[in-house]
């Protein structure tokens, strides 16, 4: 009876609309789940709270999931959290396994989404109490842990990878040390002549799609836009569902879903960190470490299970503390305020109907996402057969629109897109490694804020080692990750020499 | 034949130019103040604003915060009143100021709160004197929830206890976001300590942080004694039992007593008006000078391009008056725990000038 009261036809129609709209947003380079929720937020004013949340949660799940399509087929992450999807998804598509990669990605997304749903439904208030044990210090170390993936991702020399990552961190810090994060509001790393232009620094999305989309297209133009694997190979012929793969990957799937949910529930750590962390752990524990980054399903599964695991995780602090877990739930909180519903530690007890509505929406959003995406894979995979002279102009237009929309219409973001497109193209020729660079860029700002705030709050470096047992565990994980990365790198070098 | 065609063409051109000239004359006549005064707001908007869309940029990037909430409610009604599609963009302070500096045709306006001038008083990058850099428009509403909180088991019952403790040599840490609404409360407390216990004000230490969640986290970690808070964001934490790590209590509401008296009879959450009044002046006193207590109403108002046409400014002024004449909107604002506070441009400028002068005096006194 309760269930039937929640799932009214309007609820379900809005949910499906949201998922479809979200997938479209997520699949367009430069458009994100956050943007999708922000665009539809004012519309929700006209609905009941449960219906409004059905639409927005549908957009959230659809938006996060849709990002895998361009990441796999075009090497363009549809959303920041699908960066690591490109590492193995795109090489698979290049081998003519685009449809297989999409099926793996969509299935991993469903699994991650459902695990996070279960965790949210069963443990939300309890985990909120765990989340508040993570202060600035623990969050800094968690970001540092995620940054260790830079070492793991370096394809050539580890030194080049680390340099690229450091460069990414430095560029993320350009601009004002914002007072909105407790900074002093002063400019840094900006020559005074460029201060009016660079005062707000570079936004993530234009940098991301510049480095991936624009740079990739320039490279393709250079080689005559011909790629035999796209033009000649039937992408759907190997696209059967392989149960054996899932049997092998169950550990990776569960671990990645938990990492996604866990990172999601820590406010301020950021959605991209979830998939980055998950990818690095998948690499550390994989039996085929050397194959990661060359089209190995392990990496794809890790990335997609984690970024969908994030959805339920980010709702935990929102609904248990009134604190959004990521940028999308920060917009989602607007739906509650617009409807006059207070979210905080008493929300679940005070609004059981709305709580049930949210859980129902999250569960069905994942199912609808899976059905819609799984059964449209054959069609989606054909995108790569579209001649590039038709496809690329469309992508450029979408990238420019996406960049311009990042900060609601700032022309500088389009210049950023172009400049980082050129940097991505030229930099690679000079040895720049794009994945470590972008990971450094994504995590740099949070790392700085949490590092500085830790020191400001506690006044001693020792706090990074003595704050709590969590700190000790995190240092253990960081060291393990670094040691494994160095060992893998050496092993790979020896193998290459032997060859 | 060719000569005939040319003649016709020239004749046609002259007629077209004549019509265009008449059109221009009509437009300039229409833009005449008297003619405009006779028109409806929709007609004036049609004539004066060149685009079908009006963009309201706000000084916050959050779509879950009070600035977005107020702006969205006002924008929807403003759209009806002007016959335009009015859309709120949460671009943040810097991009918002840039947008209204760039566009003077009335198609982009800004809604922001006291941080617009507090950022300047605190000498923050990107903030300038609002009275000389922009045209200050009508005030719209007040958020009465600006507050300070302490852990539920804290020895401080009100901010007066904090002032006394600091005056007696105890170091008290307060988490604030620098350069704005949360810092002015901190400065006021520091100023009060300086007045009552000269030389001891340095014992009140600001811990600079960002969002409300960061401030809460510092309190949960025991890194600060007091945080800047709001009734809306922190009221549920005040209901938690004492043994909960997250439990808090309010120790100061900065709003004026008359502002709190205008809130909904039902109050907010578990707090009724009586509960709120226990934390505002004069029940809780933070002296600003010899005569009066410090109070602070978080006020939302419009800002326009410095050179925006006088008729456009008048249009927005009149439109805002029409918006706030709507009882449904007024009730909507009250239901969302805001106090509708429309003041026309002239009154708003006087009111905000006085507000700026009072807070400037506090900030300046702490620099001495």
Image (cartoon, coloured by chain):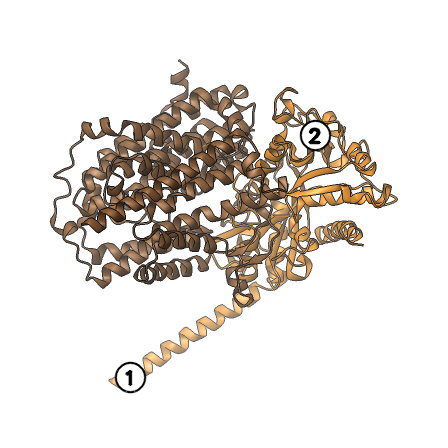
Chain colours: A brown, B orange
Q: Mark 2 or mark 1, which is nearer the start of the sequence?
A: 1
Q: Is residue B287 left or right of residue A271?
A: right
Residue A11: horizontal and vertical position, in percent? 39, 27
Instruction: Check the residue under mark 1 and report the chain it is in.
Output: B
SS class, disc 2: strand
Residue drawn at x 45%, y 27% is A50
Q: Which mark is residue B4?
A: 1
Q: Residues within 10 Å of mark 1 (few under 14, many from 20)?
A: few
Residue B193 visible in rendering: yes
Residue B186: horizontal and vertical position, in percent? 72, 42
Q: Which mark is residue B250?
A: 2
Residue A59: horizontal and vertical position, in percent? 38, 36
Q: Is residue A32 left or right of residue B149?
A: left
Q: Is residue B51 above or below residue A47?
A: below
Specify the quadrant of the image occupied by residue A379.
top left
Q: Is residue A250 above or below residue A373?
A: above
Residue A457: horizontal and vertical position, in percent? 63, 40
Q: Nearer the viewer, residue B314 or A234?
A: A234
SS class, disc 1: helix
Residue A268 visible in rendering: no
Q: Residue furthest right?
A: B290
Q: Mark 1 against mark 2, which lies toward the viewer? A: 2
Q: Nearer the viewer, residue A374 or A37?
A: A374
Quadrant (top left/top right/bottom left/bottom right) for the C terminus of chain B? bottom right
Residue drawn at x 36%, y 76% is B12
């Amino acid at each position: 009876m309760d269930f039937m009261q929640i799932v009214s036809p309007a609820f379900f129609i809005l949910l499906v609309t949201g998922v479809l709209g979200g997938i479209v947003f997520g699949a367009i380079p430069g458009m994100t789940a956050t943007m999708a929720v922000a665009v539809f937020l004012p519309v929700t004013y006209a609905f009941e709270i449960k219906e409004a949340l059905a639409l927005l949660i549908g957009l959230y799940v659809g938006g996060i999931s849709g990002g895998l399509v361009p990441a796999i087929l075009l090497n363009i992450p549809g959303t920041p959290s699908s960066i690591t999807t490109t590492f193995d998804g795109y090489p698979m598509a290049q081998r003519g396994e685009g449809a297989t990669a999409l099926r793996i990605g969509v299935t991993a997304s469903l699994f991650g989404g459902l695990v996070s749903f279960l965790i949210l439904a069963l443990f939300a208030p309890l985990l909120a109490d765990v989340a508040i044990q993570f202060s600035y210090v623990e969050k800094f170390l968690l970001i540092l842990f995620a940054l260790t993936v830079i070492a793991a991702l370096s394809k050539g020399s580890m030194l080049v990878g680390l340099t690229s990552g450091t460069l990414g961190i430095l560029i993320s810090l350009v601009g004002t040390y914002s007072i909105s994060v407790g900074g002093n509001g002063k400019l840094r790393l900006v020559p005074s002549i460029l201060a009016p232009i660079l005062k707000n620094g570079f936004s993530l999305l234009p940098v991301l799609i510049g480095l991936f989309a624009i740079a990739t297209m320039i490279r393709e133009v250079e080689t005559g836009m011909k790629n035999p694997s796209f033009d000649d190979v039937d992408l759907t012929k190997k696209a059967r569902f392989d149960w054996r793969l899932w049997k092998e990957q169950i550990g990776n799937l569960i671990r990645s879903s938990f990492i996604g949910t866990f990172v999601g529930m820590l406010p301020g750590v950021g959605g991209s960190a979830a998939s980055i962390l998950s990818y690095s752990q998948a690499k550390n524990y994989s039996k085929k470490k050397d194959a990661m980054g060359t089209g190995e399903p392990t990496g794809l599964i890790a990335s997609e299970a984690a970024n969908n695991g994030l959805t339920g995780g980010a709702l935990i602090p929102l609904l248990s503390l009134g604190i959004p877990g990521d940028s999308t739930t920060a917009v989602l909180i607007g739906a509650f305020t617009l409807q006059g519903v207070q979210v905080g530690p008493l929300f679940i007890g005070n609004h059981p109907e709305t709580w049930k509505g949210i859980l129902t929406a999250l569960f069905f959003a994942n199912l609808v996402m899976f059905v819609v995406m799984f059964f449209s894979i054959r069609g989606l995979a054909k995108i790569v057969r579209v001649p590039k002279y038709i496809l690329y102009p469309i992508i450029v237009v979408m990238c420019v629109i996406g960049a311009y929309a990042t900060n609601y219409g700032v022309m500088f973001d389009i210049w950023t897109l172009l400049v980082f497109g050129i940097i991505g193209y030229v930099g690679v020729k000079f040895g720049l490694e794009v994945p470590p660079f972008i990971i450094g860029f994504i995590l740099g700002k949070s790392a700085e804020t949490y590092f500085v705030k830790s020191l400001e709050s506690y006044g001693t470096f020792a706090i990074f080692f003595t704050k709590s047992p969590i700190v000790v565990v995190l240092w253990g994980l960081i060291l393990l990750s670094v040691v494994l990365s160095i060992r893998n790198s050496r092993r790979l070098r020896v193998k290459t020499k032997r060859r | 034949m060719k000569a005939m065609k040319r003649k016709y063409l020239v004749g046609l051109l002259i007629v077209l130019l004549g019509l265009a000239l008449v059109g221009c004359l009509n437009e300039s006549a229409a833009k005449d103040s008297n003619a405009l005064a006779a028109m409806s707001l929709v007609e004036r908007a049609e004539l004066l604003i060149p685009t079908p869309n009006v963009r309201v940029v706000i000084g916050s990037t959050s779509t879950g915060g009070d600035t977005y909430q107020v702006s969205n409610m006002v924008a929807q009604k403003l759209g009806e009143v002007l016959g335009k599609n009015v859309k709120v963009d949460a671009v943040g302070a810097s991009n918002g100021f840039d947008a209204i500096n760039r566009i003077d045709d009335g198609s982009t306006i800004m809604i922001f709160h006291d941080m617009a001038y507090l950022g300047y008083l605190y000498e923050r990058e990107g903030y300038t004197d609002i009275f000389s850099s922009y045209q200050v428009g009508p005030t719209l509403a007040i958020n009465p929830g600006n507050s300070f909180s302490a852990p539920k088991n804290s020895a401080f019952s009100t901010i007066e206890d904090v002032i006394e403790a600091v005056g007696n040599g105890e170091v008290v840490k307060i988490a604030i976001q620098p350069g704005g609404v949360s810092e002015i409360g901190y400065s006021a407390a520091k100023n009060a300590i300086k007045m009552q216990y000269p030389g001891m004000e340095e014992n009140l230490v600001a811990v600079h942080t960002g969002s409300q969640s960061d401030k809460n986290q510092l309190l949960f970690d025991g890194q600060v004694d007091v945080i800047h808070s709001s009734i809306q964001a922190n009221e549920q934490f005040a209901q938690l039992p004492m043994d909960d790590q997250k439990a808090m209590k309010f120790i100061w509401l900065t709003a004026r007593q008359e502002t709190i008296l205008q809130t909904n009879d039902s109050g907010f959450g578990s707090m009724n008006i009586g509960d709120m009044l226990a934390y505002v002046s004069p029940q809780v006193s933070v002296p600003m000078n010899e005569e009066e207590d410090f109070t602070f109403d978080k006020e939302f108002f419009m800002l326009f391009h410095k050179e925006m046409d006088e008729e456009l400014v008048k249009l927005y002024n009149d439109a805002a008056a029409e918006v706030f004449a709507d009882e449904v909107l007024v009730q909507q604002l009250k239901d969302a725990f805001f106090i509708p506070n429309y003041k026309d441009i002239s009154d708003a400028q006087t009111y905000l000038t006085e507000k700026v002068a009072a807070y400037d005096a506090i900030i300046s006194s702490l620099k001495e």
